[in-house]
Amino acid sequence: MKKCYLAILLLIFLFPLLGNAMTKEEMTQINYTKVLEIEKPEGFTSVQGMIVTDKYFVVAVINDNPTDNVTLLIYNKEDYTLADIEKNGTMTFSFGHANDFAYDATKNEIYIINNTKIHVVDSNT
């Protein structure tokens, strides 16, 4: 009986949202202006994710070599160039893939998740 009430409540709250959903035809009519397209640099096989800070956007990429290193590429938001930070705007970490990562502006820390751990990186350094 409880399941039935839950299903009814979900329908009551979700049904109005479904009525406002865009159709496929409406979605294809949306136009956008591409500002820029940045290719991954030579020597990397794939892009793993991205975070945005107040001054930079940071992209996690996987190296071509089999050492399983993740490199964070740090780009200036102002002009989309690699930041002039130590090692020419890159930081390399040896922990495999960056399955996901996030930025906490209050602590100025980057949290990177791989298959087994959460790595906390101080953005000030």
Image: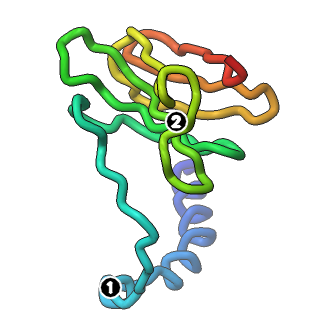
Nearest to the observer: residue 33 or residue 113: 33
Residue 4 drawn at (x, y percent): 53, 56
**Extreme residue toward the right, this view:** 106
Upstream in sequence: badge 1 or badge 2: 1
Name the residue at 55% across, 14% down: 119
Residue 54 drawn at (x, y percent): 71, 46
Q: Which quadrant holds residue 51?
A: top right
Classify residue 43 as left or right of residue 89: left
Residue 89 drawn at (x, y percent): 50, 30
Residue 84 drawn at (x, y percent): 57, 33
Classify residue 89 as left or right of residue 25: right
Distance in Å between CA atoms under marks 1 and 2 = 33 Å
Classify residue 98 as left or right of residue 123: left
Q: Amino acid at mark 1?
A: Thr
| Looking at the image, residue 58 lies above or below residue 86 | below
Nearest to the observer: residue 98 or residue 39: 39
Q: Amino acid at mark 2?
A: Ile
Q: Which mark is residue 28?
A: 1
For label 1, the SS is helix
Quadrant location of the C terminus? top right
Nearest to the observer: residue 116 or residue 54: 54
| Looking at the image, residue 1 lies above or below residue 45 | below
Q: Which mark is residue 76?
A: none
Task: Please name the residue that numbered disc 2 is placed on.
Answer: 74
